[in-house]
Image (spheres, grey):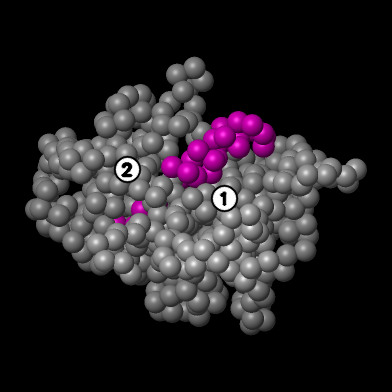
Amino acid sequence: MQSNSVQFKTPMFRILSDKQIEELHFATLTVLERSGVAFESAEAIRLLADAGADVTNRDRVKIPSYLVERALETAPKIITLYTREGEPAFVLDGLSGAHFGSTPNPREYMDPWTGRRRKTYVADMIDQSRLIDALPNIEWCWNATTNLTLPIVAGGDFSGRVSLLQFLRNCSKPVFVENVDVRSLKDMIELCAIVGGGEERLRKKPFFGSSSEPVSPLIEGKEAVNKSLLCAEKGIPNIIYGMPMAGATAPATFAGCLIIANAEILSQLVAVQLKKPGAPVIVGAIPSVMDMKTTIFSYGAPELSLMVGALTELLHYYKLPVFGTAGCTDAENVGIQATAEVTYQIMVTMMTGADLVHDVAVAYHATVGSPELIVLVDEIIGMVKVLMGGIKINKETLALDLIERLGPRSSFLTERHTTEHFRKFWVPTIFDRSFIKTAEAKDAEAKLTQKALELIMTHQPKPLPDDVLNELDKVEARYLKRLGLKEYPKKGS
């Protein structure tokens, strides 16, 4: 420790000034008080009415600022997530850096064996789960819904439940889920309680969380809010996030789009904290632009990362854990465009500090998953961590005594100081630094495929206890019966 010295652990980077953050905050309060938000959940409307909100018009529920301030006070500032075995995985606190998560069940799958895009099968979910488990910089899972190979039956879309089941068998990292309704969420909680040793232990050491999505602009749907209220009741961490699209479902200005996103977050946060003060909530959004040539919601747009970064700063002003998005691309294949877009997103996200970062390695406007892209993003995250580690300056690292002892025209290669420190250098696993090329040398794209396939075929996740596996088998048998299947569809069937 040096007197009058301030050491920054990571580089300093800001998008918004303190004044701009305050302006966005007060503008959001104005929208909530004057414009209002549409609520479709009867329970949420009752909670808001009892607390003093104006619910005369359910399409224009007006929330006074004191309810927002109260919700911001009671919402937890720190959330610890665990592995399925109950060991601490990481902490969401606005200080510990970004934690990146990928998905085991994309809508479509870039087959690493053929290099072709096709539907995602249950066997692919297993492969993706093992890949997520194996890669060190992919720390959690984002379990999506909607599978094109499983039938939709009465009682809802079972694909999210089937995917979660495969993930729990093949990966021990934390998992957050999309789910279509309260019924599916209840089934998923029961499923995770089997693995986690009961609902009470799941609440105390959560490795599972849910999500609820407002519909832009400013619509809090019935199922979305009721899922949030159920999570509050059971103490399950829940992500609140919308997807406002500048120029379509939000104003075509970045500030206007951010206000829509923040109003959607805070209005649902108020209802959740009224239901149960202290309920664990992670907040964020995926604000992007509508590409005016194609009308797509662009997942690789630089504006997405700009607005996610700015929103992160605003939400950290509230001291809330933040849900982010990075490592995505609009490209269909791994190539120059994909590499540029995912690298840009990871850099911005890590420098602005979103806590729980999702949709890593999704491609083609968030419709395609790619094992090779997950491996690439894992490598890039490792590179950017070097930047975020900063430079430690103290007596040991300055090495003045060593420099004085050796002096000019010397080599530091054989010194103990070198052997004690060089292992901290980042070492690539995909990118090539070799000087002499051999006939067996592979380019980076080939290495991505090779590493992805090797991990899929050889990685062995921690096994679950036999009694837990037996219970999961029973659940799976019920799922297959509900789906009217004897076994899951296979590629080519």
Q: Within the image, what quadrant is residue 457 found in?
A: bottom right
Q: Nearer the viewer, residue 194 or 488?
A: 194
Q: Give the answer, above or below, for where 383 lies relative to 260.
A: below
Choose between 259 and 178: the one closer to the eye. 259
| Residue for point 20% across, 51% down | 45
Q: Amino acid at mark 1?
A: Met
Q: Residue at x 55, y 66 (%)?
A: 405
Q: Residues within 10 Å of mark 2 (few under 14, many from 20)?
A: few
Q: Is residue 430 visible?
A: yes
Residue 441 belongs to the span the image colors magenta? no
Element under disc 2: loop
Mark 2, residue position: 14
In depth, the one of 384 and 391 nearer the eye is: 391
Of the image marks 2 and 1, the number of the one nearer the N terminus: 2
417 lies left or right of 263: right
Q: Is residue 288 left or right of residue 266?
A: right
Percent from the top left, x then y, of residue 190? 49, 70
Q: Does the image show residue 32? A: no
Residue at 42% across, 61% down: 393
Q: Residue at x 15, y 55 (%)?
A: 69
What's the distance in space between the residues labelled 2 and 1, CA to CA? 21 Å
Vertical position of residue 32 compared to residue 156: above or below: above
Image-quadrant location for residue 413:
bottom right
